[in-house]
Structure formats: structure tokens, C-alpha cells
């Protein structure tokens, strides 16, 4: 029995579409972080500049940290998108079942009372 609440499946579709777009953007960010932010150790100076290795190590650590953050965000968004899709499918299936149940129900008002 319905309590009068309805779920707008098109809004769930919009959420899923936006999440998929966000996943695509995260893939691009991951590619950039992984392949377009690499700085060779020589860019920080020669071996005569003692801090150059420390700068390069600090850069590599931050690069790895950013890659991990992007990976974790991607997983979170993917999980949320998958869950949202499952919820949308369940609501859709229930709506179909309700429609079939209503159309299959006998018309109780058309026959007379059996008192």
C-alpha cells in the first residue's frame, strides 16, 4: 500500500548521468596526475645542489599522494554511482510490479455484493 510518496526516476537518471560524467573527469585527472606532472630530478638542480634530491623526493611523494587521492575519489564516486543505479532499478521494478498488480486485480466494484 502506497503512502503517497513517489520517486522521480528521471532525477535518479540525472544523478547517474552526472556521476558518470564526474567519473570521466576523474579518469582525465588521473591521467594528468600520473603522466603529465612528472618532473625529472635534474630539473631541481645538479648534484652540486645538495637539496635537489630532497626536492625531487618531496615532489614524488606529493605526486603519489595526489594519485592516491584521485584513485580513492574515483572509487567512491563509482561506488555511489553503482548504488544509485541499483536503487533506480529497484524503484523501476517496483513501479512495474505495481502497474501489473493494478491491471491484474479484479474490478471489485463492477459485481454486486454477495451478501
Image (spheres, rainbow, N blue to C red):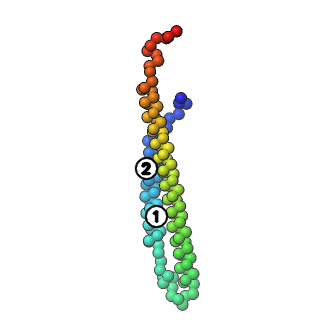
> Which class describes the residues within 10 Å of circle 2: few (<14), some (14-19), or many (20+)?
few
Can residue 8 be seen by looking at this rendering? no
Check disc 1 and report its element: helix, strand or loop: helix
Residue 17 numbered tag:
2
Residue drawn at (45%, 27%) of the image: 102
Q: Is residue 95 visible?
A: yes
Coordinates of residue 73 in the picture (x, y in percent): 52, 59
Residue density around tag 1, few if under 14, some if 14–19, many if 20 or more, within 10 Å: some
x, y (%) of residue 109?
46, 16
The answer to whether residue 34 is above or below residue 109 is below
Q: Residue furthest front?
A: 114
The numbered disc on residue 29 is 1
The answer to whether 56 is drawn above or below residue 5 in the figure is below
Q: Residue furthest top?
A: 115
Question: Residue at position x 45%, y 39% from top?
Answer: 92
Residue 12 lies, in percent from the top left, at: 47, 44
The residue sitting at the bottom extreme is 48
Amino acid at each position: 500500500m502506497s503512502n503517497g510518496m513517489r520517486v522521480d526516476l528521471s532525477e535518479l537518471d540525472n544523478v547517474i548521468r552526472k556521476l558518470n560524467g564526474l567519473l570521466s573527469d576523474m579518469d582525465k585527472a588521473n591521467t594528468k596526475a600520473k603522466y603529465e606532472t612528472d618532473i625529472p630530478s635534474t630539473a631541481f638542480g645538479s648534484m652540486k645542489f645538495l637539496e635537489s634530491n630532497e626536492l625531487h623526493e618531496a615532489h614524488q611523494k606529493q605526486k603519489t599522494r595526489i594519485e592516491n587521492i584521485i584513485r580513492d575519489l574515483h572509487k567512491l564516486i563509482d561506488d555511489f554511482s553503482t548504488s544509485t543505479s541499483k536503487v533506480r532499478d529497484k524503484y523501476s521494478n517496483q513501479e512495474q510490479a505495481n502497474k501489473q498488480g493494478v491491471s491484474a486485480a479484479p474490478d471489485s466494484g463492477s459485481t454486486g455484493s454477495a451478501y
